[in-house]
Image (spheres, rainbow, N blue to C red):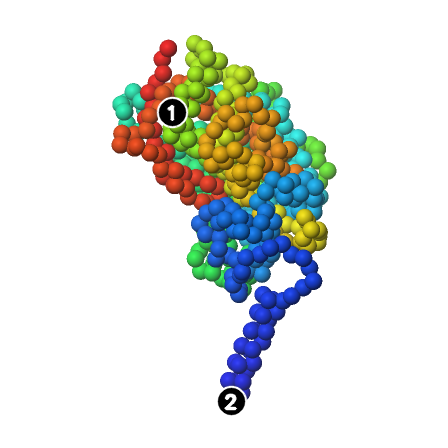
């Protein structure tokens, strides 16, 4: 046997030994139940196109705390309200870290944003900044007029379509993305970015950004296979999108700096500052206890659009899809909204306070169709005992919010769309009721839930107040098949026929 053959055989023998040790080693630890896994891949092959459904099916066999392996990475899957409370309340501090992801590094300024930044002093500072200065109750309410104005513009757009395209279907998905983007742009950047030129480019960037952020990078779990993401071009595409978005934000910030100087010279003031104005004010006044630079500002702004666009307009898609499937629920909602508003032509946010059924419809939509059915991954910072099981430091944690929200132990007829279940119930989505966590909970809960729900309620109330809705001719049943990207969308655009409502 020559030397070369000997080296090859010895190398193969060593690889087999390493794999055997890595994947079949025995320990004294009491780990959670696990399904069988493959060498190298672990359980990655069992996830499928719809992870929330695959993980729920596995959990039904192995329990509400289940240990998977994505490559070499241990992943704890949480599928019950009790276990979600343990992770996001009882042991919230231990599970408050975020695992590193290559796409987040590329797209989110090396994970300097709020959503994906590692747990620590930097994250605490920027989250506090966002909560106090951008997403406080007072600040969200100050954008109420913007929401009302953009909802009114949306209504006029639909009326014009209805008058010029009799009995033709309207692309509601496109309408929802447009109004959500307009409200976010005016609130965050000071004006709309719609139509041709830079507006069109910005909308394209937002959509492409969301698609890329939802991409799974095999290199995150099997580092030596990271070259596959280079071969398929996803890293290069992400770098290109990140560069274009960075240049766009630089331009927006420069315009605000110039405009701010002009207003100061002329003694002008605006009634409502947008997010860029607020962040520039914080930066210039050194009002925070850490070095707040332009990169951090841009990371926070990107977060606002990432969390605010796709997840927010998707809720509207699902709400209208369910209402179109169930005319009785649609009519009940329309009766409430039209009774509260009366003969007035516009809906104010004060009206929403009195629309209990509208809020029940929104809650039921979030329960059955959470935008992020599997919440953003967490990571344990140290070893811990959880429900009698040993969880090692560095274990990723996936909370299956959809599995929890459709658990028959918590919900009657969990797969049925029944807004009435919330009418005489105190259960809410603010992170205290762990059977209903579409926005997460604890330290890593979404700080923008009030902004998102105010937007969705305003838009939906206007849609059902000003119009009656029908499915296109020949559509006996609405297709609710889904496409999983960053968030859970309808597979096809939502089409419906609007008829203006007149007393």
Q: Is residue 46 visible?
A: yes
Mark 1 vs 2, N-terminal side: 2
Please state which of residues 65 and 323 is positioned toward the viewer in this rendering.
65
In the rendered view, would you say 200 is above or below 381? above
Element at label 1: helix
Tell which residue pokes out farthest to the right in this image. 289
Element at label 2: loop
Please state which of residues 450 and 395 is positioned toward the viewer in this rendering.
395
Q: CA distance from mark 1 to mark 2?
A: 79 Å
Image quarter in which the C terminus is found: top left
The residue singled out by tag 2 in the image is 2
Tell which residue pokes out farthest to the bottom in this image. 1
Across and down, in percent, residue 351 comes to: 52, 16
Residue at (49%, 52%) from the top-left corner? 47
Q: Residues within 10 Å of mark 1 (few under 14, many from 20)?
A: few
Residue 327 occupies quadrant? top left
Please state which of residues 221 and 37 is positioned toward the viewer in this rendering.
37
Disc nearest the viewer among 1 and 2: 1
Across and down, in percent, residue 481 comes to: 39, 41
Q: Residues within 10 Å of mark 2 (few under 14, many from 20)?
A: few
In the rendered view, would you say 379 is above or below 454? below
Is 477 displayed left or right of 300 in the figure? left
How many numbered circles does the render carry? 2
Q: Is residue 315 visible?
A: no
Residue at (43%, 57%) from the top-left corner? 232
Across and down, in percent, residue 72 comes to: 58, 61
- The circle drawn on residue 327 is 1
Residue at (63%, 50%) from the top-left corner? 379
Residue at (69%, 59%) from the top-left corner? 29
């Amino acid at each position: 046997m020559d030397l070369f053959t000997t080296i090859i055989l010895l190398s193969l023998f060593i690889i087999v030994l390493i794999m055997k040790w890595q994947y079949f080693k025995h320990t004294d630890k009491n780990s959670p139940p696990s399904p069988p896994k493959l060498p190298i891949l672990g359980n990655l092959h069992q996830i499928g196109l719809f992870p929330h459904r695959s993980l729920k099916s596995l959990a039904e066999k192995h329990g509400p705390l289940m240990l998977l392996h994505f490559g070499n990475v241990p992943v704890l899957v949480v599928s019950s309200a009790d276990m979600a409370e343990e992770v996001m309340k009882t042991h919230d501090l231990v599970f408050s870290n975020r695992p590193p992801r290559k796409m987040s590094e590329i797209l989110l300024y090396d994970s300097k944003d709020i959503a994906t930044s590692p747990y620590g002093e930097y994250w605490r500072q920027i989250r506090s900044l966002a909560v106090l200065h951008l997403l406080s109750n007072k600040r969200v309410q100050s954008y109420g007029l913007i929401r009302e104005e953009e909802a009114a513009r949306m209504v006029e757009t639909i009326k014009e379509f209805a008058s010029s395209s009799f009995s033709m279907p309207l692309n509601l998905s496109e309408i929802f993305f447009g109004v959500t983007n307009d409200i976010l742009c005016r609130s965050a950047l000071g004006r709309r970015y719609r139509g041709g030129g830079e507006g069109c480019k910005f909308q394209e960037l937002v959509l492409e950004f969301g698609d890329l952020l939802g991409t799974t990078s095999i290199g995150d779990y099997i580092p030596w296979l990271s070259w596959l993401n280079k071969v398929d071009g996803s890293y290069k595409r992400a770098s290109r999108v990140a560069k274009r978005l960075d240049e766009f934000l630089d331009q927006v910030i420069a315009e605000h700096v110039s405009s701010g100087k002009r207003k100061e010279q002329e003694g002008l003031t605006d009634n409502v500052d947008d997010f860029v104005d607020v962040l520039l004010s914080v930066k210039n006044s050194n009002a925070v206890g850490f070095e707040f630079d332009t990169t951090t500002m841009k990371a926070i702004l990107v977060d606002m659009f990432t969390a605010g666009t796709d997840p927010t307009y998707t809720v509207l898609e699902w709400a209208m899809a369910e209402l179109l499937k169930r005319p009785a629920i649609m009519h009940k909602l329309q009766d409430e909204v039209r009774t509260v508003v009366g003969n007035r032509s516009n809906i104010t946010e004060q009206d929403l306070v009195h629309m209990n059924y509208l809020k029940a419809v929104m809650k039921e939509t979030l329960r059955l169709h959470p935008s992020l059915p599997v919440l953003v991954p967490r990571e344990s910072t140290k070893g811990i005992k959880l429900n009698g099981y040993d969880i090692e430091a560095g274990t990723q944690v996936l909370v299956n919010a959809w599995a929890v929200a459709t658990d028959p132990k918590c919900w009657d007829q969990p797969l049925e769309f029944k807004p009435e279940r919330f009418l005489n119930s105190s259960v809410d989505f603010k992170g205290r009721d762990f059977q209903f966590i579409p926005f997460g909970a604890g330290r890593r809960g979404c700080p923008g839930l009030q902004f998102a729900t105010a937007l969705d309620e305003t838009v939906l109330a206007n849609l059902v107040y000003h119009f009656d809705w029908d499915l296109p001719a020949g559509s006996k049943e609405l297709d609710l098949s889904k496409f999983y990207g960053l968030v859970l969308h309808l597979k096809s655009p939502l089409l419906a026929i609007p008829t203006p409502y007149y007393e």
